[in-house]
Image: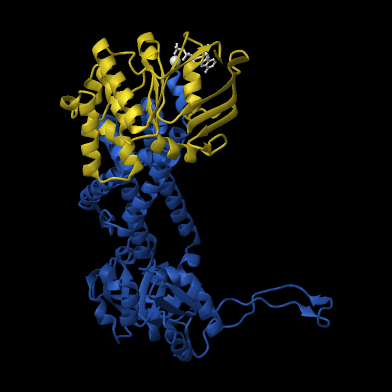
Chain colours: A blue, B yellow
């Protein structure tokens, strides 16, 4: 062993109490850092999962167009400047071709068309406003995992049955519907239809459960008095949802229709997530930095205690860098012990919290052993330890032996 | 042959008042010489010794050691030279208390890194034996008496077979028997090994028996 590390580790072991206090500081900071960040990953994951139960990664649709000002000549004065929504149909023209085009993108996993129709559920004389989503049931289930939200009935019965409907639990309650009951709905075009309840679903959002229902694509087209090429949205799922914001513009140029990623579609929710992330990151770093101050203080104390030793060592020919190495050995050993202890502690905390049942559609507390956070924590912890040790070590290296010997 | 040479060394302290501690110090020390430095308390002996040992670099004038001009060299260069060529025994400050006597003696050799661990251990044991401390070798340094600590410090100063050994009152804590032992060791080192000794002392007997005496008075050599 090098003489510098030898001296450093001797200081470490002869001052067991101070070492232990410093190690405990790093251990606590470290475990809480890893724990909080693993929790953040868990939160983000469950939030995304619940968003993806009603939102596709990317939605392709025809945006409303505004009329352009009429110009006298190119670049000249405008004659008419009163932009209004052009009264064009919001259908996607030639949807099969567009779907085929989107499927060619290597990122894409599922593509399914959809028609949304605003409707009324009729109960005697009263009407409840709502929204019927026309889908291809098997594809829609793959995308939104609808079956996992079904509380009664069988979503598979929707397949190829244009008379079937799956209603939200709120709708079912208000209309006192049971499986196989009939329900009458009216579309905005005044079309009336009788449908049979095949399934009842319940999401974590009661506003959705009180208004939404799934019907077959062709049933929705009939309600809107449109032919079978009428499609309002094409829902697209991709391999990595995080890439949605990047893939969406590609689809826009590819298809010529507006494509919107799920993050853009849920902007205010995303803003809340970002805030959550900022708060957790800030708090976890603060705790680590406080642990760093612990090491800094304890090393400063050691340097003051050992100032006589430092003077003797320098007189005997130890260079400034040797002295830095002696104290860095001490700091980094504390860091390594703290980091390892902190990881063990974090595993314990995560294991305990994983077993806590929250309920709702969350179930158990959404936290897991996030390897990247463990590694990240170890690196950040060691970097902080390094600087917390380097500053007192540099101070020690600058000690003037003569001024100590004169005392 | 001269091992050490000073030319017109002056040193001032500025705090609390401007004060010249050393005035035009010029002398030479030959290889194998046993030199004693005496003088009243406060005459500047320790201050001069710190300069000669290259630890204090704030002075005017020129210092040459082993034919090399050391004035103006970097701290790292000076440290490397001290490790190899100079051994120290300080006034009041001796050992690293948390290490064994053996380890204390070994540290300068481990730093030098020229010999294997076994060689260094054997050598350290020899030096401790020379000073009659072989049975204390594994005790922590803090558990020794003042005189024993001083002798361990002398053993440590010898470990790298330095060209020069500088001591600030090396026998200050020793009884007459041990003073005689240390004196004999120094005498032998200078006459047989050709090592040079510069020792600050208040012991007139010790000084009288050395090869040469330099007396200091108010910062001047008289
Ligand atoms: N850091 C300092 N600042 C100002 N004056 C100092 C400082 N160190 C020493 N002195 C003064 O310099 C003078 C010489 O001190 P030095 O320690 O060299 O004396 P000495 O000859 O070794 O004395 P002693 O025999 O008591 O050890 C003394 O007058 C002392 O007061
Ligand atoms: Mg003195």
Of residues A53 and B65, the one drawn nearer to the viewer in this rendering: B65
Q: Horizontal and vertical percent for residue B5?
A: 53, 29
Q: Is residue B12 above or below residue A2?
A: above
Ligand 2 in which quarter: top left
Of residues B125 and A392, the one drawn nearer to the viewer in this rendering: B125
Q: Is residue B105 above or below residue A185?
A: above
Q: Horizontal and vertical percent for residue A301?
A: 38, 28
> Does residue B182 show up?
yes
Q: Is residue A362 above or below residue A65?
A: above
Of residues A72 and A309, the one drawn nearer to the viewer in this rendering: A309
Q: Is residue A206 above or below residue B154?
A: below
Residue at far left of view: B135
Q: Horizontal and vertical percent for residue B215?
A: 49, 13
Of residues A305 and A334, the one drawn nearer to the viewer in this rendering: A305
Residue in view at x 31 percent, y 40 percent: B110
Instruction: Work out which quarter of the rendered image holds the C terminus of chain A and state it.
Output: top left
Residue in view at x 27 percent, y 15 percent: B180
> Does residue A16 show up?
no
Horizontal side of residue B185 vs A260, given as left or right? left
Instruction: Work out which quarter of the rendered image holds the N terminus of chain A and state it.
Output: top left
Q: Examine the image and state in which quarter residue A41 appears.
A: bottom left
Q: Horizontal and vertical percent for residue A397?
A: 45, 35
Horizontal side of residue A347 vs A274, given as left or right? left
Horizontal side of residue B26 vs A406, given as left or right? right
Horizontal side of residue B119 vs A258, given as left or right? left
User: How many dots with numbers?
Assistant: 0
């Amino acid at each position: 062993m090098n003489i510098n590390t030898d001296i450093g580790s001797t200081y470490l072991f002869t001052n067991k109490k101070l070492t232990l206090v410093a190690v405990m500081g790093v251990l606590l900071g470290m475990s809480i850092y890893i724990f909080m960040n693993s929790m953040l990953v868990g939160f983000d994951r469950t939030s995304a999962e619940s968003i993806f139960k009603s939102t596709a990664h990317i939605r392709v649709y025809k945006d409303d167009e505004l009329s352009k000002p009429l110009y006298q000549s190119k670049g000249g004065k405008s004659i008419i400047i009163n932009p209004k929504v052009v009264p064009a149909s919001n259908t996607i023209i030639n949807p099969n071709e567009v779907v085929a085009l989107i499927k060619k993108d290597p990122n894409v996993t599922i593509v399914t068309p959809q028609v949304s129709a605003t409707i009324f559920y009729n109960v005697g004389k009263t009407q409840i406003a709502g929204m019927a989503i026309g889908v291809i049931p098997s594809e829609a289930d793959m995308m939104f995992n609808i079956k996992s939200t079904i509380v009664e009935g069988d979503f598979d019965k929707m397949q190829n049955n244009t008379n079937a409907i799956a209603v939200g639990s709120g709708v079912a309650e208000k209309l006192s519907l049971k499986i196989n009951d009939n329900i009458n709905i009216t579309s905005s075009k005044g079309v009336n239809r009788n449908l049979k309840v095949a399934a009842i679903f319940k999401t974590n959002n009661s506003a959705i459960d009180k208004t939404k229902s799934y019907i077959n694509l062709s049933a929705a087209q009939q309600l809107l008095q449109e032919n079978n090429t009428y499609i309002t949205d094409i829902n697209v799922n991709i391999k990595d949802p995080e890439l949605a914001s990047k893939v969406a513009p590609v689809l826009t140029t590819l298809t010529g229709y507006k494509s919107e990623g799920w993050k853009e579609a849920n902007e205010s929710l995303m803003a809340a997530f970002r805030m959550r992330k900022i708060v957790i990151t800030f708090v976890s770093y603060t705790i680590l930095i406080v642990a760093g101050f612990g090491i800094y203080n304890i090393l400063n104390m050691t340097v003051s205690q050992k100032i006589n030793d430092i003077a003797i060592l320098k007189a005997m020919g130890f260079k400034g860098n040797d002295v830095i190495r002696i104290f860095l050995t001490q700091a980094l050993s504390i860091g390594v012990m703290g980091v390892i202890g902190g990881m063990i502690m974090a595993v314990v905390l995560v294991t305990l919290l994983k077993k806590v049942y929250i309920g709702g559609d969350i179930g158990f507390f959404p936290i897991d052993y996030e390897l990247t956070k463990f590694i990240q924590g170890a690196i950040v912890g060691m970097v902080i330890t390094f600087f917390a040790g380097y500053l007192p070590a540099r101070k020690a290296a600058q000690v003037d032996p003569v001024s100590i010997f004169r005392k | 042959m001269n091992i050490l040479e000073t030319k017109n060394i002056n040193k001032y302290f500025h705090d609390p008042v401007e004060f010249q501690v050393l005035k035009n110090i010029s002398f030479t020390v030959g290889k194998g010489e046993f030199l004693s430095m005496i003088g009243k308390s406060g005459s500047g002996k320790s201050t001069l010794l710190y300069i000669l040992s290259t630890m204090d670099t704030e002075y005017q004038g020129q210092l040459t050691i082993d034919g090399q001009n050391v004035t103006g060299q970097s701290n790292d260069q000076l440290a490397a030279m001290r490790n190899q060529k100079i051994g120290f025994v300080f006034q009041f400050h001796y050992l690293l208390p948390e290490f064994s006597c053996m380890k204390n003696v070994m540290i300068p050799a481990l730093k030098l890194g020229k010999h294997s661990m076994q060689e260094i251990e054997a050598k350290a044991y020899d030096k401790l034996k020379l000073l009659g401390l072989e049975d204390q070798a594994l005790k922590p340094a803090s558990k020794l008496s003042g005189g024993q600590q001083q002798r361990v410090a002398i053993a440590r100063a010898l470990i790298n077979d330095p060209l020069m050994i500088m001591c600030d009152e090396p026998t200050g804590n020793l009884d007459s028997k041990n003073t005689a032992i240390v004196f004999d060791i120094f005498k032998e080192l200078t006459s047989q090994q050709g090592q040079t000794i510069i020792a600050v002392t208040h012991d007139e007997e010790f000084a009288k028996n050395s090869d040469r005496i330099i007396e200091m008075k108010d910062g001047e050599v008289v």
